[in-house]
Image (cartoon, grey):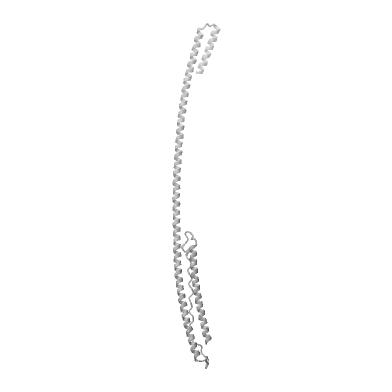
């Protein structure tokens, strides 16, 4: 009978150790979840990432604790006419069994309460971490969208400014080209007027020169004719003089 009690006590102690090991596993899972959250916080977030990408996996709830088997099983019956050593042994065994049952119930209740408390804390912490991760993810997404909109607006403003500057520069170049064209045409017109004036002056000079030359030649011819008629002439001299005068006069007329 005492061996049975000792075996039951050993089983209860083993179950208590199992419960404590489960509690340690839950604490380890909670620490791992906290480490994952810290790593997610320290890791740089990509721009415009979906919110679900930053959510950490919640802590897996611990396995339900199997309550220990009760020690309320009836004590082994003695063989017919058998005795374990007297009434004192029965009383002592009953006391030991009662104390063992009480200690097992107390340890089981404490382990169950501790496991429930750890499970509630783990769930609360997991929900808190999940909420913080979602809030941080939403903030990062909003910041990325705001930066993208700002960059887009800046690019549009810069493009409009460059387009306006290009148009102004093109208009300035066209205006300068038209002004230079007008200046060149004006210069050509002025040069043309000057050349036409010079041509008119040359033509006037030519007419005047021809007139003066003709007048001069005619006067020379008259002088020669007067001299020829005044000088004594014989037939040959007269004929030679007349031939020379007539030839010179013809050349003068041809020159005019």
| Residue projecting furthest to the bottom | 81
Q: In the image, is residue 46 above or below residue 243?
A: below
Please indicate, yes or no, whether residue 252 appears anywhere in the rendered image: yes
Depth check: give the residue in front, 103 or 212: 103
Residue at 50 percent of width and 78 percent of height: 16
Depth check: give the residue in front, 37 or 247: 37
Depth check: give the residue in front, 174 or 23: 23
Question: How many numbered marks does the figure carry?
Answer: 0
Please indicate, yes or no, whether residue 73 appears anywhere in the rendered image: no
Image location of residue 160, percent across then percent down: 44, 49
Residue at 46 percent of width and 32 percent of height: 187
Residue at 46 percent of width and 80 percent of height: 106
| Residue projecting furthest to the right | 236
Residue at 44 percent of width and 37 percent of height: 179
Depth check: give the residue in front, 206 or 254: 206
Image quadrant where residue 168 sits:
top left
Image quadrant where residue 128 sits:
bottom left
Image location of residue 131, percent across then percent down: 44, 66
Image location of residue 173, percent across then percent down: 46, 41
Q: In the image, is residue 93 above or below residue 155?
A: below
Image location of residue 117, percent across then percent down: 45, 74
Q: In the image, is residue 66 above or below residue 171?
A: below
């Amino acid at each position: 009978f005492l061996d049975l009690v000792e075996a039951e006590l050993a089983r209860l102690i083993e179950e208590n150790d199992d419960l404590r090991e489960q509690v340690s596993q839950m604490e380890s899972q909670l620490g791992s979840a906290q480490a994952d959250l810290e790593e997610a916080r320290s890791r740089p977030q990509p721009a415009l990432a979906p919110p679900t990408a930053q959510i950490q996996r919640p802590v897996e709830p611990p396995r339900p604790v199997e309550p220990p088997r009760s020690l309320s099983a009836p004590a082994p019956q003695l063989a017919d006419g058998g005795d374990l050593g007297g009434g004192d042994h029965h009383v002592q065994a009953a006391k030991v069994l009662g104390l063992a049952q009480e200690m097992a119930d107390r340890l089981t209740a404490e382990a169950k309460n501790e496991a429930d408390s750890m499970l509630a804390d783990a769930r609360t912490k997991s929900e808190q971490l999940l909420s913080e991760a979602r809030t941080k993810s939403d903030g990062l997404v909003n910041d990325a969208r705001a930066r993208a909109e700002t960059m887009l607006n800046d690019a549009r403003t810069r493009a409009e400014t460059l387009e306006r500057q290009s148009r102004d520069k093109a208009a300035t170049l066209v205006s300068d080209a038209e002004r230079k064209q007008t200046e060149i045409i004006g210069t050509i017109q002025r040069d043309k007027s000057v050349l036409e004036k010079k041509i008119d002056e040359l033509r006037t000079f030519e007419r005047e020169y021809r007139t003066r030359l003709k007048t001069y030649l005619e006067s020379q011819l008259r002088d020669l004719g007067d001299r020829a008629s005044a000088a004594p002439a014989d037939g040959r001299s007269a004929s030679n003089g007349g031939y020379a005068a007539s030839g010179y006069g013809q050349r003068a007329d041809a020159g005019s």
